[in-house]
Image (spheres, helix red, strand yellow):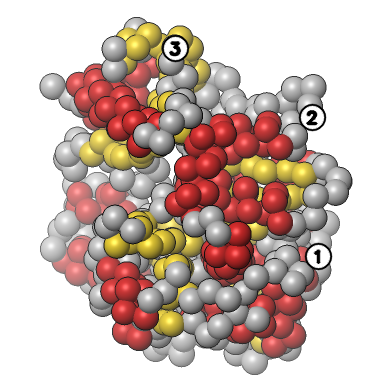
Amino acid sequence: MGSGDPSGDEERPQPAVPATTPDPALLFEVAAWLASDPDRGTRAELGNLVEEQAWEELAERFSGRLAFGTAGLRAQMGAGPMRMNRLVVRGAAAGLMGFLRDRGHPAPLVVVGFDARHRSDVFAADSAAVIAEAGGRAVVFDVAGPTPLLAFAVRHLGADAGVMVTASHNPPADNGYKVYLADGAQLVPPIDLEVAAHIAAAGLDVPLAAPGHPAIAVMDESVRRAYLEAVVGQLSPGGARQVRVAYTPLHGVGATTATEAFAAAGFPALHIVADQADPDPTFPTVAFPNPEEPGALDRGLALAAAVGADVLLANDPDADRLGVAVPDGSSGWRVLTGDEIGVLLADHLLRHRDRDGERLVVTTLVSSRLLGRLAEARGIHYAETLTGFKWIVRPVLEHPAWRFVLGYEEALGFAVGSAVRDKDGIAAALAFAELVAESQVDGVGVLERLELLARELGLYATVGYSLRFGSSAGAAEQAAAMQRARSLPPVMLGGVAVSARRDLLEQPPTGDADAAGRAGSAARADVVVWELADSSRVVLRPSGTEPKLKVYLEVVEPVAPTPEGYRSARLAADRRLAALRSDLDELLLPG
């Protein structure tokens, strides 16, 4: 039984801790953490805070324990239980093992993956060592790789669980920890609370297996090949492939896998943004490594224009999200929204792939309702869930006989087909490239396809934004804004009557479970929904990581059957969205 240190860190000197402080309980917690922390960097950081008597900062770091949010544990790296560090990771791995043993898995198999962020490989090694010492078996990525590969590997290897060390598209200082169970899906309540209880019981001094332990293995290359075969196999057999693609992984881990996938599918070679092609945890060319952020696609757009590309595709750092831009004859290039990408993919998949049997599409409460309208028009099943792919895949698990076509959320997350039960930016990139190639064969461009859908189903215009509050009292102001939304709901917004109100703390979503057999997954959440008499909708929810309120607006405009009908509808939608936003800012912001 070992207590090896995968990083090879040195013996831990004990920094001097002042004997007196305004909060003796905090001092005790800090001293215990210092005594257990295996990492010289976070020990020094915490010791410096103590020496500087930074009690407010220390109190915040020791105010609780990181909890599972929309996509697992995620926070800035640093010392203390409210940051991402080696003690937090070891506790999470120990808690997962305790949970699995309680569920009847005395020697569970756990797949461990990691991206290219700072410390991801160390966090993964620590996790594997905890798993092995606790009697489990760990299969670990040989190199940094995409999150969808880890989600795929869980089911492919018949594992009992999976762990992915990643902060996805967060800033460089962050890292995170996603947990999957044997079904290949992320944790949902109340299971996350059970795992959290085991984490709390694990304590700070978690035993680790010695380096080279036989229960720790490196993932076989066959898993990667199987993943590529699965996602490529979801494309239309004999479908169009002639498309010129510009691509950027935004300094993440997507380039190698995307290149291999596109080659295996028979597409021409990708044109990759050279100075964003290799993994770099500092993300030097972008302010935020998120395809949604303004400026993040600038280098990709420049390359796309230079090579005459038909489409620009962009993955985030762990390659589970997809950004898209297409040529626009009037302004050069247009970056598509997540809702536009989602409905375009759904329309393409429903038109070009196997149409037999019952089919299912899924999206979230904060995404556009156009997907539901499309599903109704095509006679297929539709479900609406809470935000996050841990919820989006629930209807898939609940109805295994239905063919899963697409799940998406407006924040550029897409699951295409059933190969991966999480968002997958590689599979989505393949599908969108096929869509563009097919559009060229059909003679109907991507933006023309959006217009055709609007003419058929109505123009569904969406906008999402955040109301940010001051840092000093931000959390209180955020809570007060949600309380105002609940206790003093508006009667009118943008000059239109509010016709219905829903509070998801009291009334969880159930999808559209009507006679057609549509399904949804229910859970309570801190979300308020207002529906307006003109079919507009407002959704409010607090951010789980910052002092801000997230606002999602949608208006619906009919499109007149005239040459100017579509343009007129867009202008009208823009005016309505602006009026809604103006009223909401006045209602929700303090003062």
Above/below status of 99 relative to 471: below
| Badge 3 amino acid | Ala
| Badge 1 amino acid | Pro
Q: Nearer the viewer, mark 1 or mark 3?
A: 3
Secondary structure of residue under mark 2? loop
Kindly identify which residue carries mark 2. Answer: 517
Is 151 situated left or right of 555 in this image? Answer: right
- Quadrant (top left, top right, bottom left, bottom right) of the C terminus: top left
- Quadrant (top left, top right, bottom left, bottom right) of the N terminus: bottom right
Rendering quarter of residue 377: top right
Q: Is residue 350 at least partly visible in the picture?
A: yes
* Foreground of the two, 500 or 525: 500
Is 119 situated left or right of 365 in this image? Answer: left
Cα distance between the residues tagged 2 and 3: 27 Å
* Foreground of the two, 354 or 483: 354
Q: Position of residue 51 (x, y in %)?
A: 16, 66
Above/below status of 570 relative to 110: above
Rendering quarter of residue 489: top left
| Badge 2 amino acid | Gly
Kindly identify which residue carries mark 3. Answer: 533
Among numbered discs 1 and 3, the one appearing first in the sequence: 1
Kindly identify which residue carries mark 1. Answer: 106
Question: Label 3 near label 2: C-beta < 8 Å?
Answer: no
